[in-house]
Amino acid sequence: MIDVVFLKTPERIEALGIVYVMALLVYGMLEYLIRAKMKYEKNPLILAVKPCDTCLIILGKKPKGLSNWQAMT
């Protein structure tokens, strides 16, 4: 992702770390605001994305196309 060419000095490494921390802070703040607003919604959030097989297995549901699948108990 980041090549050695851009991180020649310790100051640049530190600056990149600060950028990452700030990005995580903004992400956390947005997640908090969205979750706070969702508490007052009457309708649940419905995503138009189909869950992958791994997600279904984690949730204990049978994925399509697996005939000999058993849920882990």
Image (spheres, helix red, strand yellow):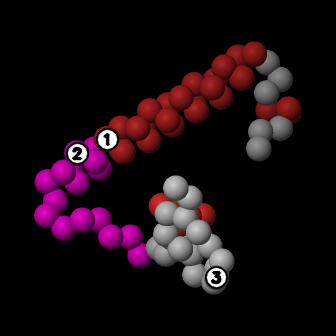
Amino acid type indicated by mark 3: Ser
Name the residue that disc number 3 marks. Answer: 67
Point out which mark residue 36 bears.
Answer: 2
* Residue 66, visible in the rendered structure: yes
Q: Is residue 5 left or right of residue 65?
A: right
Name the residue that disc number 1 marks. Answer: 32
Q: Nearer the viewer, residue 63 or 49?
A: 63
Q: In percent of the image, x 55 and y 64: which residue is there?
A: 71
Element type where label 1 sits in the image: helix
Point out which mark residue 23 bears.
Answer: none
Amino acid type indicated by mark 2: Ala
Q: Are marks 2 and 3 in contact (CB under 8 Å)?
A: no
Mark 1 neighbour density, 10 Å: few (under 14) some (14–19) many (20 or more)? few
When the figure is inspected, residue 9 is found, relative to residue 58, above or below; the finding is: above
Mark 3 neighbour density, 10 Å: few (under 14) some (14–19) many (20 or more)? few
Magenta-drawn segment = 33-48
**In the figure, residue 65 lies in which quadrant?**
bottom right
Q: Nearer the viewer, residue 4 or 29?
A: 29
Mark 1 vs mark 3: which is more N-terminal?
Answer: 1
Query: Percent from the top left, x then y, of residue 26?
Result: 42, 38
Q: Is residue 1 left or right of residue 39?
A: right
Query: Percent from the top left, x then y, of residue 72?
Result: 56, 58
